[in-house]
Amino acid sequence: MMAKPAATAEQAEVLETHAPAPAGPVKKLGGPAIWFDERIGLAKLGKASLRKVFPDHWSFLLGEIALYSFIVLLLTGLFLTIWFKPSMGEVEYHGSYQLMRGLAMSQAFESTLQISFDVRGGMLVRQIHHWAAILFMAAMTAHMLRVFFTGAFRKPRELNWLIGVGLLSLGMIAGMTGYSLPDDLLSGTGLRFTDGAIRAVPIVGTWVEFFIFDGEFPGDAIIARFYMAHILLLPAILLGLIAAHMALVVYHKHTQFPGPGRTEKNVVGYPLFPVYAAKAGGFFFIVFGVLILMGATMSINQVWLYGPYNPAQVTAGSQPDWYMGWVEGAVRIMPGWESHWGPTTWSWNVFVPFAILMGIFYTALGIWPFVESWLTGDKRPHHILDRPRNAPTRTALGVAGMTFYGLLWAGGGNDILATQFSLSLNSVTWFLRFAVFVGPVIAFLVTKRMCLSLQRADRERVLHGSESGILVRSQIGGYSEPHVPISVDEAFTLTQHRQYTPLEATPTEDEHGVKLKGPGTVSGLRAKLSAWYSGYDVAKPTAAQIAESHHHGDEDTPALPH
Amino acid sequence: MRSGSSRRRHKAARPFAVALALVLMGALYAVLSPATQVAADTGMSAQVAEGKGLFQVTCSSCHGLNGEGSSQGPSLIGVGAASVDFQMSTNRMPMARPGQQAPRRPVTYTAEEIAAIAAFVQSLGPGPAIPPSSAYDASNLDAEAIARGGELFRSNCSACHQAAASGGALPNGKYAPSLHGVEPLHIYEAMRTGPQQMPVFSAGAIPDEDVASIIGYLKELEQQPSAGFSLGGLGPVTEGFFGWVVGIGGLCLVAVWIASRGARAK
Ligand code: HEM
């Protein structure tokens, strides 16, 4: 990620973001604008937000990709609702796709074929809608990783992180319901999978299944119900959460990477208007354009190949969309364990990878900001981002999590891996059964090491400067490479971060033997975890050490030939 | 190269010695055995005789001199001419090296040689014969019959071969191959003889006209334009992969460009 301080730092103007002086109605507005301004004070509101400052870093645009693909989803989805028929009623197909002529199918599938083949631009819009869903989820995931690895979730942004976790999980459900709507063989198989997962929930599973499907799978209600959720309920909640998410971003102001002139009290960047707005507006059209290109040139979910859903049929390579792939993988590599207690069946083979794993995953994501602050004892607000190396345990945990997720992903595509790389399906599965446990541990250790080496390299660089790349031969014949001191700005960037001293355990009882509890106390366990979490940092050089090293350099290092 | 050819010579040498001994034994047997057997042998057509010769040179190391099977290969008695035609026309047989599954390769035997060996194997015990082209002709099917072929394909075949016939994985390193570009004749023969893990679909289960429908569907499917690049026709896994690489990858490049532009464009 950020190896060097952002190049924009030096050139960018520093804008302190205090509230603008109260201003009267803006004069230069046109008629309708004045009309509105006099009634709802638009100008004042607009002016404050127009002066909001956004820093520039490419990774800050990941969230925007998610935002824009969501808008594209709304627009294309609206188009699709005009023709889609959310009904499982059976019809005989007489549309223009010859290879389905005369087949019995649901109205949902028939109308999907109609949109694809008979509605002008329908195929394009269907494909854009699906690609936008893929991109929406991918951008959210990438955005979340950016937020995680840079520590942007720390106080005061924990709430926005929680909203983000909500968005991610709801996005997954929105995608899942959308995937089920066309009622083709893949979506039916996916529903079957969901149905099995629901049923595997002990005790209430069957009851919930009957509730959702209005009877036994597949029933004849599920498409209409999912349709309601997909086009009304979920978009509305998503929209609300996104609005709250954006409002909080504006309210908290954006975080920024460390650099000279950047403090916890300011934001260095461009005012929302016009620079950022122009960029953001431009970026919206680029995202839209890329999605149109993808929809126009890359086929996606060709439902006519899969045919109408029929519970008696199945196809090799039945997979969910990528964001459910890790759950699919967990189910695929899980050994087929099952217990029978009394009249009940406990399908661990489905319940564990589905409900328990997903539960753990989202819970872990949600509580992380609080866990981290508990480990470091840090309750201060943060607006300057971490460079990932400076939070080595967090970074290592993140990479371990990505490794775990990635291996489960591979499990979800185990058959595709087997056929495309001529591997044995069984070997892939057995390898993954062990790798999902060993891989993350290795990833953790390696990442942590790398972070610490990078910290050491930073320290060296601050104390001894950068290599000049020039070999100097001394009079007695020895060779040496003089180092040039780095700029003050860079030294600042490399040393501005705070390093934590692990928490010390406080006494558990006072002198009268009364148990001590409360905000100030630290238990032995917490102290141990805290030492594990932040006890390995390579001490950054102190100001005295830096001064000393510069002095030292003057005498020893041969001057560079000019 | 050299070690390869000498190994092959090596491999062939033993069956040859056995073959020679057997021919001698056979000659002796022919002289001594009852008359009916003699009649059967003399009734063997020239084609079968030619096939027998070829078989004993190329196939007997695994399938035994008279197709009775060995530890290296199954018995071919009763598998029928269709099975041999399928296996040899797709050049799965002769198997190049023992393995999980003989892959499809470009054919190296002439039609006459294949027909001769097929006739010989058919003479060992009756099995599915090579069908006349009328049995699987799909050229006169109407749209409904082809659509029904699609239903039959999804009911009977797509679990292994994938809905778009792109192929799929089976346990233990085995796989169901892609069916794109497979000859109609070989589709018919594969169904009737069930190579490897594939079940036999007998005429009782799927009559000839339904086989023709399936063939018609598969051939039509190949003609269908895809809505953009097909991305391998493998479904959501490759779609997700391209979504990340093209979508996120491409847009990140744009984001890097935008973030660096602004600083100067101010
Ligand atoms: C509907 C999906 C989402 C949209 C449209 C979205 C959009 C955005 C945008 C445009 C920003 C400001 C620019 C940026 O930092 O990238 C932002 C910031 C933020 N997002 Fe999201 N996001 C989404 C999902 C998530 C998720 C899944 C998480 C985490 C679980 C999350 C956590 C955050 C946080 C903590 C910030 C503040 C970051 C900062 O100020 O540095 N968001 N979001």
Image (cartoon, coloured by chain):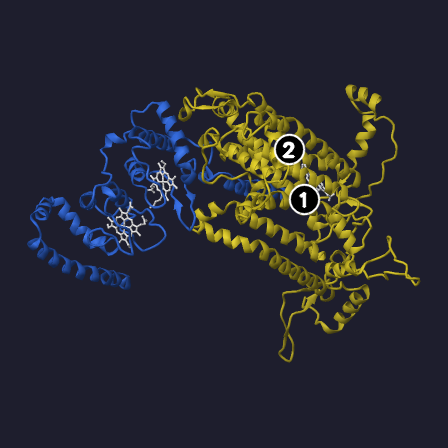
Chain colours: A yellow, B blue
Q: Residues within 10 Å of mark 1 (few under 14, many from 20)?
A: some
Q: Is the residue indicated by label 1 positioned so its CB lies within 8 Å of ligand 1? A: no
Which amino acid, mark 1?
Tyr
Give residue A161's quadrant in the image: top right
Q: Secondary structure at mark 2?
A: helix
- The quadrant of the rendering that contains the C terminus of chain A is bottom right
Q: What chain does badge 2 belong to?
A: A
Which residue lies at the image location 41% right of the left edge and 51% below the top edge? B173
Between A470 and A248, the residue placed more toward the observer is A248
Q: Is the residue indicated by label 2 positioned so its CB lies within 8 Å of ligand 1? A: yes
Q: Which residue is denoted by mark 2 in the rendering?
A: A70
Between A313 and A6, the residue placed more toward the observer is A313
Between B177 and A67, the residue placed more toward the observer is B177
**Position of residue A441 measured from the top left corner of the image (x, y, whole percent):** 62, 58
Mark earlier in primary sequence (1, 2): 2
Is residue A411 rendered to the left or right of residue A274? left
Give residue A23's quadrant in the image: top right
The label shown at residue A233 is none
**Position of residue A248 measured from the top left corner of the image (x, y, whole percent):** 77, 38
Which amino acid, mark 2?
Phe
**Position of residue A439 measured from the top left corner of the image (x, y, whole percent):** 58, 56
**Position of residue B74 measured from the top left corner of the image (x, y, whole percent):** 28, 51
Placement of A503 over or under B119, stated as above or below: below
Q: What chain does badge 1 belong to?
A: A
Q: Do the residues bearing badges 1 and 2 touch, measured as CB atoms within 8 Å? A: no
Placement of B213 over or under A515, stated as above or below: above
Q: Which residue is denoted by mark 1 in the rendering?
A: A362
Q: Nearer the viewer, mark 1 or mark 2?
A: 1
